[in-house]
Image (spheres, rainbow, N blue to C red):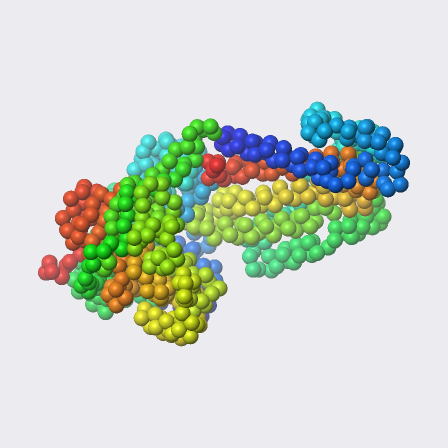
Amino acid sequence: MSILSVENLKLKIGSESILDNISFRLDQGRILAITGESGSGKSMTALSVIQLQPKNAILEGEIFFHDQEITKKDEFELCKIRGAKIGMIFQEPMTALNPVKTVGNQISETIILHSTKNKRAADKETLKILERVGLSPAAEFKKRYPHELSGGQRQRVVIGIAIALKPSIIIADEPTTALDVTTQAQILALLKKLVTEDNIAMVLITHDLAVVADMADEIAVMQNGAIVEIDETQNLFRNMKHQYTRSLFAASGHSVNLPITEVNSNPLLTIKNVTCRYRLARTKIFSKSDYFTAVSNVSFDIKNGERVGLVGESGCGKSTLTRAILGLEPIYNGEINVDNQNILKATSSTRKNIQVVFQDPFGSFNPRHKVSTLLKEPFYLIKNSPEAKNIENKIDKVLEDVGLSAKDKNKYIHEFSGGQRQRIAIARALIIKPKLVIFDEAVSALDVTVRAQILDLIAELASEYGLSYLFISHDLSVIRSITDRCLVMKNGKIIEEGSTKKVLEQPQNAYTQILISAAPKLPNFQTEL
Amino acid sequence: MLRYILKRAISLIISLCLASIIIFAVVEIAPGDPASFMLGINAQEDTVAALRAELGLDQDKLSRYFTWVSGMIQGDFGTSYTYRSPVAEMIRERIWVSLPLALYALLISTLIAFPAGIYAATQRGKSGDLAVMGATQFGIAIPNFWFAMILVVIFALKLRWFSAGGFLGWENGIFQSIKSLTLPAIALALPQASILSRVMRSALIETLSEDYIRTARAKGFGKRAVIWRHALRNALIPVLTIIGLQFSFLMAGAIIIEQVFFLPGLGRLVFQAITQRDLIVVESVVMLLVFAVITVNFIVDVTYAITDPRLRRRV
């Protein structure tokens, strides 16, 4: 008897079918990965298993936990199963914990809820759990609030809550997606260890095929609410029976065909000994202010035609540096020049040469403007901006260049998908023909297949428009595929620099080596055969 | 935490200093002589001069300001020109009506708003929610003096449970006093409760969509337990803000209700002082109200920090 078996699960919201005939089984001690792109129904499957699907959803089919039919249970019985028998881990450790309660409290309340233990016994147990998930000294961590922990530490707390009562199943919904690669590696290792030690079955939901390959015994690939392929990990990667699995795999390991460009020796962007720092809150009312140095003595330049990558984990100073380059951040020391003009004093005609594409395709547009208005905006930077008719033509052209159609200019931004929005963001950056574009994690929020398309588009447009770019990313595979030269940043400093190939294949710095080894890799079962 | 309170306290003192300067400037330095203003246009010149001397207007402005402020700190608010009695005493009498009335109204408002708001949030979109929201719409729309009159007609004239107005003073029995403040407090509380329950509802609805609520549900807490254990405290910040604002309003804004129920409160005192051009009383009462508002804001700030640990470290 499987611990969990889902049979012909269907879920509808209104007339829209979200899940279609989902069936799978999970045995003790095994890890089943559910993978697929956003909107494929992975998370909804997970929520259905613990019966926390949206209120207005209509569910059909059967879910057996041991021999108990979960969909037939009432709320009271379900509350006894949730948290005690089935533990959940969610994606966003930043928001998954209650900000006004200490982490110790949040773990111990689960124990008190499901067992006969009193407060003191639960506290004792909490300490053990904190140690187990690697938060030591536990007594110290127990008293902290979530905002006092890092993302990885918070995820450890969430894992602690999930394993607190030794459940027979853990459902982990994108547990490492919001984390840095090195943290991701630690959290995955921790999960694997706990699952093995306690002989727990786990459903691991992730969009990342590389993570799946490392962790799972069995993989289910989902598309549009249905499982298109389900098999043992090795078999699945070896055979890839379904077309969608193949395309997903191809997109994950997508390598961009980077056109060869001529690199001009003229530096387009020069960054000389730049330091940026923030004032920290004072520890005592009349003490001297302390500073946090986010970017420390950074120097590099980008020549005309160069495609440069900047890699680093969160908090390394990438974002501060990006803002400094855009002239949005006060520079404490040093100088940033664009086209031989200091960016902080640059006129709008110089500033027009540098444009940016941000990470979040949903938040970076004014929702009340039409696409044409959004695309028109950069023209305000140009002194003699072209006539209205001419601008319209340019809008049509740039929309077609990024793979949309001229008709799209009359739509509003909410009418587009994430990938299309990112195309519009690129169109907005390109419309006034800048020399340098900064891509700040520009593909991180996108699904793999969309990501592959956008990367191709960037490479193609860069050569068409004669662009240089600085591509900032935490994702080594992206940097590998789209840049010629790359910089590795840590604690505000550039610690390694060189051609992308060399840095990624023969890293000199110890940190770069850790970064590369921590990144999950796609398996290569086919060549093994 | 202590540092946070200390900082808030410093900003409290600074606000009070600024407020006192502004009030002083408006009343004393604004064009026109306070003495001749208070006496009206037909006043004799020697009467004006006598009043000027009595008010100390012949001294320079700076020393007058400091005399005023130091007097207030010691509880001396000057002497009312029209009543010929110490302002401090007049205020003391009134504040024993206004402050309990405000607190009473606030208590009623909170006692109605919390359950109503929480209930509406949990019933979101269902008939219970619609009923509560409809009722609050009604509560906001009804002018409170009219509601006060209806209360008088029903509970005082018809049922004779309460008196129609007046306040005999606390020395004549606490129960009696509370009883005579009940109808006015209900009249004051109705619109406040309506607003507050709407705020409570929307804050709670927003909180209930947070990720940590889903986490709590996944831990095995039922819907109710999640509200009590996880959602309520997080939803409290906007509610506290509104409670603070409402208290300030209730202290000073009860003029009409005080008129309807014939209560000797601060609102009526200010109203009378303005019509009688008694600037000394106006100035003192305004300063007192400012003090109350700023102090309440200080208390609200401290409760923020108690509620939300993330605010404790903020500068």
- Residue at the left extreme, as displayed: A529
Taking the spot 35% from the left edge, 51% from the top edge, the residue there is A343
**Where is residue A183 drawn, in percent x and y?**
28, 45
Locate residue A349: give its quadrant.
bottom left
Taking the spot 30% from the left edge, 55% from the top edge, the residue there is A339
**Where is residue B197 drawn, in percent x and y?**
62, 50
Q: Is residue B224 left or right of residue A61?
A: right
Taking the spot 27% from the left edge, 66% from the top edge, the residue there is A465
Q: Can residue A281 be seen in this view?
A: yes
Q: Can residue A203 be seen in this view?
A: no
Vertically, is A512 above or below B312? Answer: below
B79 or B93: nearer the viewer:
B79
**Where is residue B263 drawn, in percent x and y?**
80, 40
Q: In this view, does B100 lie to the left or right of B84?
A: left
Q: Is residue A330 left or right of residue A466?
A: right
A137 or A315: nearer the viewer:
A315
